[in-house]
């Protein structure tokens, strides 16, 4: 049973220490306000959290859909109790919206493939896809870009080319869940026992794609006439076992995907720029007006799109902002440095005015 949900020998070995505590392995299928649907070797059942999690509310401490957990499972009717979360092979973390200190929210775990879904309608945003790519590289999962609603778009090939130009070797597929176009190409990324997650704005057709892949109506999708309500149709994350053996995690649309500590992911997503930086004459080139700047040269001769450069700068600003915000100490450090620089500057100025050394 559990093998079908991705249980492996490696997980089994990892689990031995939990097994000695009398726990059974299980995977979280659905998570809704403190209640969970899980699958154990004996089948699906519901579960609640052990009390210790209430005190253990550290970032990412709670189990999420697609986590492997250790449960104590009473025989009979009662809920299983989740007592431990197994180490995650990959984590997809986003910035939690809202006031207060920024926190990372684990959106998906143990995901092998991330299907980054965007619609081929007028809203298609390369900048949004860049963000998803950066987060996916950071997560450790393999990205695949899926452009939906090809049946409604007259310029599919152009759009695909635009996305390929910012995705560097990441597969990009144009599909239609209505006509079936491109679904076979998507299926090739979904291997039995592997887990894929669907990520993308609300209304792009994630749940419709799940249904098309499953060949039946599993997820509720938006009625056409409700197309502009702006409401999320899918309200919770759900892990679904597809007929050909792959697992797919449907998620509610995310309008904003705040970056969470994704500096390494950003570097990978902007490999083209990293390559340019290596060619700048100065190692600490700020790419503003230095001589021998490869970025400036590429902008001038048109090989680098200004919008892509602008996008990278925004990412850097955001990462810097977040880093400063997260880390009070580093902020104090920056301030101390600034004060020190100011003092040094004034001291040098005085020194200069006094005439400096005679040498
Ligand atoms: N023409 C066309 N319409 C589609 C296609 N895929 C989805 N749609 C329509 O797009 C609307 C939204 O689809 P959903 O699958 O509910 O979108 P979602 O991404 O799951 O949205 P949330 O659950 O809110 O995040 C529905 O009315 C679908 O019928 C497609 O390939 N072609
Ligand atoms: Mg949905
Ligand atoms: Zn430069």
Image: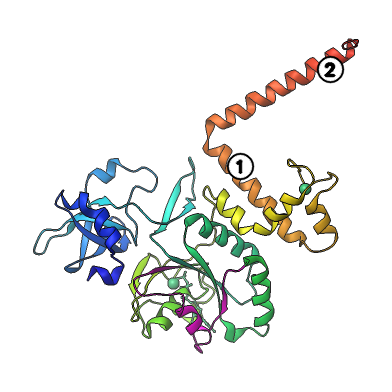
Pick the front one: 13 or 325: 13
**Residue at the spot x=28%, y=59% of the render?**
11
- For label 1, the crowd category at 10 Å Cα-Cα, with few meaning under 14, some 14 to 19 and many 20 or more, is few
Give coordinates of residue 320: x percent, y percent.
62, 42
Q: Report the front residue among 9 and 321.
A: 9
The colour scheme applied to this rendered structure is rainbow
Magenta segment includes 257: no
Q: Residues within 10 Å of mark 2 (few under 14, many from 20)?
A: few
Question: At which x and y percent is residue 268?
Answer: 59, 56
Q: Main secondary structure of the magenta part?
A: loop
Magenta residue span: 169-197
Q: Where is residue 3, by image quadrant?
A: bottom left
Please tell me in which quadrant of the rendered image residue 51 appears. top left
Q: Distance from label 1 to label 2 (Cα)?
A: 31 Å
Residue at 31% x, 57% y: name it.
33
Marked residue nearer the N-terminal end (1 or 2): 1
Judging by the rendered image, the residue that carries numbered circle 2 is: 349
Q: Which residue is at a point 28% across and 65% down the rendered structure image?
A: 7
Q: Quadrant of the C terminus?
A: top right
> Which type of secondary structure does the marked residue at label 2 adopt?
helix
> Which residue occupies 57% across, 31% down?
330
Say the numbered circle drawn on residue 321. 1
Q: Quadrant of ligand 2?
A: bottom left
């Amino acid at each position: 049973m559990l093998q079908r949900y991705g249980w492996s020998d490696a997980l089994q070995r990892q689990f031995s220490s939990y097994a000695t505590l009398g726990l059974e392995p299980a995977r979280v299928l659905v998570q809704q306000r403190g209640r969970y649907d899980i699958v154990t070797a004996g089948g699906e059942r519901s579960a609640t959290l052990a009390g210790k999690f209430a005190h253990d509310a550290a970032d990412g401490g709670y189990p999420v859909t697609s986590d492997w957990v250790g449960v104590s499972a009473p025989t009979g009717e009662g809920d299983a109790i989740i007592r431990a979360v197994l180490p995650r092979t990959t984590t997809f973390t986003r910035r939690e919206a809202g006031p207060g200190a920024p926190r990372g929210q684990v959106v998906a775990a143990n995901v092998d493939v991330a299907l980054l879904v965007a619609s081929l309608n007028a809203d298609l945003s390369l900048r949004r896809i860049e963000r998803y790519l950066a987060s996916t590289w950071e997560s450790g999962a393999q990205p695949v870009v899926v452009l939906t609603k090809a049946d409604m778009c007259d310029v599919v090939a152009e759009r695909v080319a635009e996305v390929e130009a910012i995705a560097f070797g990441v597969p990009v597929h144009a599909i239609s869940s209505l006509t079936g176009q491109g679904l076979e190409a998507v299926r090739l990324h979904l291997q039995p026992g592997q887990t894929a997650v669907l990520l993308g704005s609300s209304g792009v057709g994630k749940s419709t794609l799940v249904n098309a892949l499953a060949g039946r109506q599993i997820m509720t999708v938006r009625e056409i006439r409700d197309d502009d309500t702006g409401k999320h149709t899918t309200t919770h994350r759900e892990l679904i076992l597809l007929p050909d053996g792959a697992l797919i995690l449907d998620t509610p649309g995310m309008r904003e995907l705040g970056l969470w500590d994704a500096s390494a992911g950003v570097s990978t997503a902007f490999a083209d720029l990293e390559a340019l930086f290596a060619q700048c004459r100065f190692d600490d080139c700020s790419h503003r007006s230095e001589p021998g700047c490869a970025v400036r040269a590429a902008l001038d001769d048109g090989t680098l799109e200004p919008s892509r450069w602008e996008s990278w700068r925004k990412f850097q600003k955001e990462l810097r902002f977040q880093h400063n915000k997260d880390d009070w100490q580093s902020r104090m450090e920056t301030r101390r440095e600034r004060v020190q620089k100011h003092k040094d500057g004034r001291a040098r100025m005085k020194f200069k005015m006094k005439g400096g050394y005679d040498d």
